[in-house]
Image (spheres, rainbow, N blue to C red):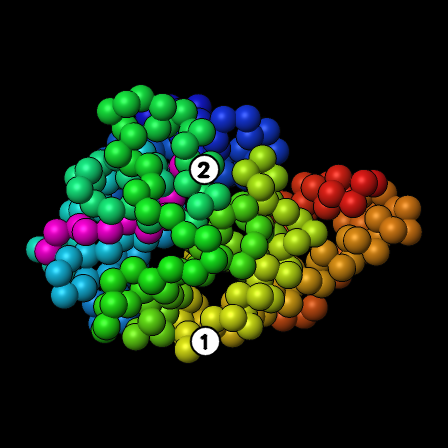
Amino acid sequence: MTRAGVLGSIITAGTVAMAAVPYAAQQPAATGPNVAQIEKVKDNLYMITGGGGNTAAYITANGVVLVDTKLANWGQAILDKVRTVSDKPITHIINTHTHGDHVGSNEFFDPKVEIVAQENTAANMAKMPAFADASKKHGLSDRTFKDKHTVLGGNDAIDLYYFGPAHTNGDAFVVFRNLRVMHAGDAFSGPNNPIMDTNNGGTGVGYPGTLAKAAAGIKGVDTVIPGHAAVTTWQAFVDYGEFMKSFVDSVSAAAKAGKTADQALAEFKPAEKFKDYNLTRAKANIETIYKEVGK
């Protein structure tokens, strides 16, 4: 696949270059053999890395549930890794949001696999060129939810939550209830200044509030799978919400004071515990927030 092809699969139609560039920097083109890696998170739950966003593979009584399917053409690599830990069929795919490095290989899996997403994500996916061809429409959502939904039940229960826009307007938090693990998608992609995809309903101003609602509304989690980083703790997710609040508060205050985006960037001083956060996208995010507040 060419680099242009990768970018086209990642960002839906109409997404501006500002959003595309960070994805290009984050994910290399999928050329050559697609080699994924698998690591155990907890009993019956694994994280598969490579080729886009982190994929979770959850082994249930009757099959395997996947969370996100990476870039296009990574389906076989995902399945190969699943087969190292289970021979059960794939029964469900849960998509955390619409981007092509998380939904790109949905089409690889059997049309009988049920695909679940938040309703805004389903609408965003329906606009993606990757699913325009009739032969690929089975990669779109079969089931949607608004605020909360539970997939399966009993010991296998997976709770899906939506608290509002952040990275996009359809970010789902996926909680493996009895394992005390959450897949956060790219609402928490890792310790960084995130992508705010306003073309898919994302927001800068509203980002901290959504994270705060998630931190308050989700109970019983101790382990978190971020969208693009190593498995971490619930406290790291809570801290990320604090970081985002400090960033947006600082930028909003600068905008209110009539300062330029460059001045806002210079004045933002993250707390010591956030000193290792990647701030590469800070300037672009400041500009996004300025647009939202009308500056």
Comparing 271 with 288, the one in front is 288
Q: Is residue 172 magenta?
A: no
For the question of whether residue 230 can be seen, the reply is: no
Q: Quadrant of residue 151?
A: bottom left
Q: Quadrant of residue 180?
A: bottom left
Q: Residue at x 27, y 53 (%)?
A: 66
On screen, residue 69 above or below 6:
below
Nearer to us of marks 1 and 2 is 2
Mark 1 lies on residue: 219
Q: Quadrant of residue 125?
A: top left
For the question of whether residue 251 can be seen, the reply is: yes
Q: Residue at x 33, y 47 (%)?
A: 143
Q: Residue at x 14, y 65 (%)?
A: 61
Comparing 134 with 108, the one in front is 134
Instruction: Tell me where the magenta segment starts and ends, as one range.
Output: 88-102
Q: Is residue 188 left or right of residue 112?
A: right
Give the total number of marks visible in the rendering: 2
Comparing 57 with 217, the one in front is 217
| SS class, disc 1 | loop
Mark 2 lies on residue: 123
Is tag 1's residue or tag 2's residue first in the polypeptide sequence? 2
Q: Is residue 255 left or right of residue 53?
A: right
Quadrant placement of the C terminus: top right
Q: Is residue 11 left or right of residue 89?
A: right
On screen, residue 264 above or below 294:
below
